[in-house]
Amino acid sequence: MSKNDRGTVLVVGTGTMGEGIAQTFAQRGFKVRLVARRREPLERCLAQIPLNLKQFADFGLLQEPVDEVMARIEGVETTDMKRAVEGSTYVVETIREVLDDKRALLAALQEAAPDLVIGSNTGSFTIDSLAEGLPRPDKVIGIHYFNPAHIIPLVEIHRGSQTSDETFAETQELLHASGKRTVLVRKEVPGFIVNRITGAIEREIDYLLDEGIVTPEDLDVAITSSIGFRFACLGPMEVEDMIGLDIAMVVSGRVFKGLSNATEPSPLLVEKVQRGELGIKSGRGWYDYSGKTRSEVLEEKNRRLLRQLKLFMETQGA
């Protein structure tokens, strides 16, 4: 797919993920139509994307002026999917994770343009559940981005039982052309790949905090200075090969027996949510963000991620 014939990607949804996905495609030469039902979230996205691009430029990760990238993004306020899909060559659906809402949108999109491939950015629904009753389930595929979508390189691809090989091939080519790395979820299971792994880690983290074994601050130091440091450049299978599968087997046999098997959220986490301590967006979570705006905190964290992205691109040949 050459940069001159990359077409127009329709992105439906203007939350944080839609914002990042639109930016990703525009940075790689695609025209983007960013669609929202209301003007306010659309304007927020169109105001935030240039700031994100400026950060990329600061790290030498943007190869052209910000205004040239922004010129490829068209913001459209509409609920008319026939108008939205006009001239589009691919559709990314990234509205909130409500099954009925997603199904209704997919139905409207297929009614408007039955031959267009629709990639659904979902982290919780199977494609079979989303495509149920659609006239062209073969044209629907899952593309699971990770937040922040304009920085994190990975997209998980997951197919429904009726997703065609052509739909998969077109989607994979599109994602690679947009600079993303992809993995295929070979069987649709709740959480797919990455969310299952992070869910297991989260459960053990909750246990350690609930039992008073470690503080949140020391937990972050422990992770970022050990397995997080390793996983930034070596995958878990590479690490097991490095330490020896025999040792991994022995350690697993000893440690697994004492791990948490909780099936409900941590009581400490529930208490924080009930108190309105929701993280950056409320000014307090595990840490206190008072005295800083949400934008200031996110900008600092994104800069740390961009430094990591630059190193990733240098070492992984991205």
Image (cartoon, rainbow, N blue to C red):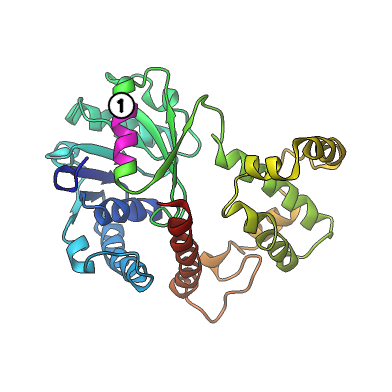
User: Splitting the image into 4 quarters, where does residue 274 fall?
Assistant: bottom right
Q: Is residue 254 above or below residue 76?
A: above
* Residue 266, percent from left and from top: 73, 50
Q: Is residue 100 above or below residue 296?
A: above
Image point (44%, 62%), residue name: 310
Q: Residue furthest bottom?
A: 291
- Secondary structure mostly seen in magenta is helix
Q: What is the quadrant of the N terminus in the image?
A: top left
Q: Is 49 in front, or is 6? A: 6
**Is residue 161 found left or right of 106 in the rendered image?**
right
Please give the residue where the numbered disc 1 appears in the rendered image. Answer: 167
* Residue 108, percent from left and from top: 24, 31
Q: Is residue 81 magenta?
A: no
Q: Which residues are magenta?
A: 168-175
Label 1 packing within 10 angstroms: few (<14), some (14-19), many (20+): some
User: Splitting the image into 4 quarters, where does residue 241 fall?
Assistant: top right
